[in-house]
Amino acid sequence: MKKKCSFLVLMVAGLLSISAVFGSGQKAAPGSGNTVKIAVALPMTGDNAEYGQSFLTAAQIMVEQWNKAGGVLGKQIDLVIYDDKNSAEEAASIAQKIVSDKDIIGVLGHFSSGVSMTAAPTYQESKVIEISNCASHPDYSKIGNYIFRNNTVITEEFKVIVDVVANDLNINKVGIIAIKTDWGTTAGGIAADLIKANDKLTLVAYEQVLETSDDYSPAIAKLKAAGAEAVVAVGMYSLYGPLARQYKEADPNIQLLGVSNAYTQQIIQLGGSAVEGLFAPVSFFAESDDPAVIEFVTEFKKRFGMEPSSLAAQAYDSIGILLEAIKQTGSLDRDKVRDRVNSINYAGITGPTQFDAIGDASKVFQKVVIQGGKFVQYK
């Protein structure tokens, strides 16, 4: 895994062609007053680097499309890139650097909810628009009116998962295995509440594991002993592959389900045949016949070597939303741009996007499942 991440770091570093220096947050060719600057603050190194690198690739594609068409307000667009390593400490420092640059209109970031929530108060205080494509903690967008999420609160994803288990799979006994982080604990608790509230389901066990662990056998033993017929896994992609392999050895018939971040080719690479049958809810499906989706997927695969995840697609749309709001506003006044973001009706590749009063986007979810070594739509 570390070797793979190292390779991708080098690959993506070669892609940083939009007037930014990898990891430094410094422009290679400053163009004071002649560019529109958007920060990207994501994990470019570390355990979650592949998420951050894929989101950056998506953001670059969107920016290049706009720049080829003349930019926005007659100016070219610069991405100013920061590596937060998915660390709250790093994010807090980076947020201060971002708000100190008065030319930055907004930021795509951060990755995990906890890291996003650490940085968000700084953006709110300085009126820098933050759009996260993946922070799903219920309290994230409540931090302020400059804080947006271009995904849903995790509750909405779990509603789809509960529906799959109860009505599509007709399974009764359900277990949960969640990573022991702020997000994992919150999300796991929400999943547990929804399962308990469904009269067709019984929550038989709820286990938490360390995010950095690769041995899930103690938790698996408890879930298996409790009689779990399906297990909802709440974690990052690095959880799913090892968990699936180890669980299938203990119980070949176990049904595994994941949240939207399970929709990534890395899971299939890490889990192989063990992840066959894994379900996930997504707001974007790469096999769509929509011409805009086809164009994005083709370009993304050319650059990144695999299909984009729904979270990468949401990163692409997040940059598009911010740029379209600037265009419609006709200025870089942060108050005006923020108001336009909040009222925008954006037709993106992840579906029509509008934000509610507190900055949450609504999404229409599709159900996908791994079959024959690839994700397919479940019907």
Image (cartoon, rainbow, N blue to C red):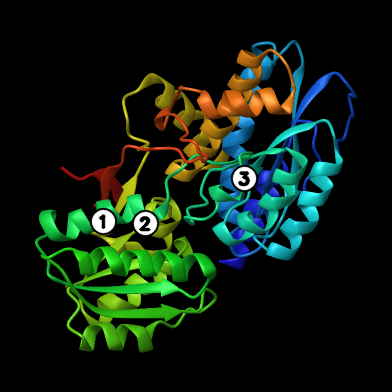
Please report the residue visible at 69 percent of the width from the left and 12 percent of the height from the top.
330
The answer to whether residue 309 shows anywhere in this view is: no
Q: Position of residue 324 (x, y in %)?
A: 59, 20
Please report the residue visible at 81 percent of the width from the left and 22 percent of the height from the top.
35
Q: Position of residue 11 (x, y in %)?
A: 66, 46
Q: Quadrant of residue 144?
A: top right
Amino acid type of the residue tagged 1 in the rendering = Ile
Mark with earlier residue (3, 1) = 3
3D distance between C-alphas at marks 1 and 2: 8 Å
**Left or right relative to 292: residue 107:** right
From the viewer's side, name the closer residue of 147 and 326. Answer: 147
Please report the residue visible at 63 percent of the width from the left and 23 percent of the height from the top.
323
Q: Are marks 3 and 1 in contact (CB under 8 Å)?
A: no
Q: Secondary structure at mark 3?
A: loop
Q: Quadrant of residue 31?
A: top right
For residue 144, the mark is 3
3D distance between C-alphas at marks 3 and 1: 29 Å
Mark with earlier residue (1, 2) = 1
Q: Position of residue 194 (x, y in %)?
A: 26, 63
Q: Position of residue 139 (x, y in %)?
A: 52, 55
Q: Residues within 10 Å of mark 1 (few under 14, many from 20)?
A: many
Residue highlighted by disc 2? 259
Q: Are marks 1 and 2 in contact (CB under 8 Å)?
A: yes
Amino acid type of the residue tagged 2 in the rendering = Val
Q: Secondary structure at mark 1?
A: helix
Residue highlighted by disc 1? 161
